[in-house]
Amino acid sequence: MSTKDEMPIRKIDHVRFFVGNARQSAYFYRNAYGFDVVAYAGLETKVKHEAGYVVQQGGITFVIMSPLRANHPDSSRLILHGDGVSDIALQVDNVRHAYNLAVERGAIGVVGPRAIEDQYGLYEYATIRAYGDTTHTFVNRDNYKGAFAPGFDPIDPSRYNPATYHPTGLLGIDHIVGNVEEGRMNEWVEFYRKVLGFEQLVSFDDQDISTEYSALMSKVVQSGRGKIKFPINEPAQGRRKSQIEEYIDFYGGAGVQHIAMATNDIVKTVRALKANDVSFLRVPRTYYEGLGDRIGGIKEDIDELAELGILVDRDDEGYMLQIFTKPVQDRPTLFFEIIQREGSKSFGKGNFKALFEAIEREQETRGTL
């Protein structure tokens, strides 16, 4: 494939959330997860149909938007999905080339290439459809120096006082997981391969990811430059409703299940998040019996990992530590993963059974297993 035909994706630019109340959600991500609120769009910035906040920590940017009126084109999302991820924006070298190439390869266009300008420069974007009603927006901000994009102003300190901002050590997005309907995982893997030039990294079947009651299958695709990883899950046949089926039922279709955020000190990060009242899934204490024998030497203290509920897995290249939050809204849909990699490029295969049994215990309390 010639360079001209390659999809020029650099990294995840931002993740756009569509929520019922952006101001309250920004407060949550700031006070619970330690994000800084850096920009605002709304009536005061001459944006008439929606309001939103840009929150950042490390290399992570979340854009949290809400409709201002019932006739907003995305208002129906809130009834169908509740709060959730509407768009994963991808930073590219050339928006027009990326969009045209994607459409030529079979993507459905939502917004054609556009360039908007203000006193801070030129911001270019275009949008295609992904699984469910999730989208990917191609973004180029090489010639834009503003707070985020036209329509967004730097945050007024009277709205969010920066003196009370406490970062939690989150550095970047490690991967973003999508749940799709049964039988459609391979279709979406092929979409990322054919349309966006991703490659399949790893595959897990229902033998790898199963418990006594439920199972799922997952494949991981990554961008050609290796900076973007998207695991895609689908439910597999089981005795009871799997977590993927539960998600699709409550979300109303395919969508983003969780976002994994990286740290270089997971113990410190999890302690800070717990102090901020973030709730995590717990595995039984028995998980930690013989853990040192199973995964070999690690620099962290196993008793401390057990106290916090942090999981460990190892592959040929090193080890990784991970922990998962409970859903961040009332519907059992979107949640977060905190991950620290010590050489490992895996996704915690050795933890799947313990983790999924923990999720099933939560499902049982909800009456949805």
Image (cartoon, rainbow, N blue to C red):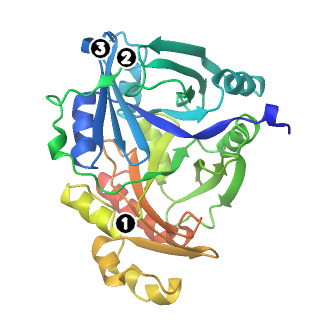
What residue type is disc 3 on? Thr
For the residues labelled 2 and 3, say whether their Cβ atoms are less than 8 Å apart. Answer: yes
Q: Quadrant of residue 182?
A: top right
Please tell me which residue lies in front, 340 or 133: 340
104 left or right of 335 in image: right
Mark 2 or mark 1, earlier in chain? 2
Amino acid of disc 2: Gly
The foreground one among 252 and 54 is 54
Q: Is residue 194 left or right of residue 257?
A: right
Q: To which residue does mark 1 refer?
A: 266
Q: Quadrant of residue 285?
A: bottom left
Depicted 118 relative to depicted 142: above or below = above
Q: Residues within 10 Å of mark 2 (few under 14, many from 20)?
A: many
Tell me the mark number nearer the camera, choosing from 1 and 3: 3
Local packing at callout 3 (Cα closer than 10 Å; few below 14, some 14-19, many 20+) is few
Q: Quadrant of the C terminus?
A: bottom left
Among numbered discs 1 and 3, the one appearing first in the sequence = 3
Residue annotated with mark 2: 151
Residue at 53% across / 67% down in the picture? 348
* Disc 3: which residue: 45
Q: Disc 2 to disc 3, how far (Cα)?
A: 6 Å
Q: Answer with the quarter of the image where residue 76 lies.
A: top left
Q: Nearer the viewer, residue 94 or 214?
A: 94
Who comes first in sequence, dot 2 or dot 3?
3
Residue 56 in percent (x, y) is at 35, 41
